[in-house]
Amino acid sequence: QVQLVESGGGLVQAGGSLRLDCAASRSVFNWYAMGWFRQAPGKERELVATISRDGGTTNYRDTVKGRFIIFRDNAKNTMYLQMSSLKPEDTAVYYCNARFGITYSDSTPGPYWGQGTQVTVSS
């Protein structure tokens, strides 16, 4: 069992920045590929970014490329999402996710989720 706890959400103006943190409960954190998903009101949950278990491979949805950076520190059992040039359409609850294995081979999430953190971008 892997427990995930997100932090760092909040309210920011368009064009601003936020960093989300996802702390994992287990020292086997580096056995898991990690990802960030988000869900806006009335919409389905969508994949935002993923990172391989060694941090060497990252992937992003097209709408956040060049604005968001996903990275991880395996020594601290923590994953991050640095978000810049935020837009109102980035408003959503952001969830971190853990999937056992080297990387996400597709957009299917793993079984472990954090509780979510709200990001609100005002125009």
Image (spheres, grey):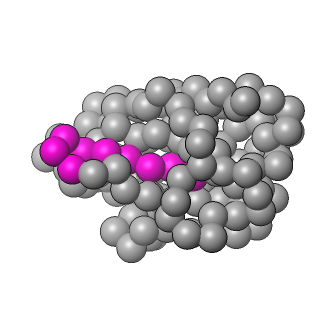
Give the residue at x 42% y 68%: 61
Above or below, 26 against 62 in this view is above
Q: Residue at x 62, y 30 (%)?
A: 4
Q: Is residue 64 magenta?
A: no
In which image quadrant can residue 53 be found?
A: bottom right
Q: Say left or right for 85 vs 51.
A: left
Q: Is residue 69 visible?
A: no
Task: List x then y, in percent, for residue 60.
Answer: 49, 67
Q: How many marks?
A: 0
Q: Which residue of the protein is positioned furthest toward the bottom in this rendering?
A: 62
Q: Residue 31: x and y, percent?
A: 82, 49
> Which residue lies at the image location 37% right of the left edge and 56% below the top edge?
46
Q: x%, y% of residue 22?
A: 60, 35
- In the image, residue 83 sits, relative to residue 2, either above or below, namely below
Q: Magenta part of the protein: which range? A: 35-43
Q: Is residue 56 left or right of residue 83?
A: right
Residue 114 seen in the figure: yes
Report the side of 80 relative to 60 (left or right): right
Q: Is residue 54 left or right of residue 80?
A: right
* 1 or 77, nearer to the observer: 1
* Above-or-below relation of 5 to 54: above
Residue sitting at x 41%, y 30%: 117
Quarter occupied by the N terminus: top right
Could you say which is closer to the camera, residue 85 or residue 56? Answer: 56
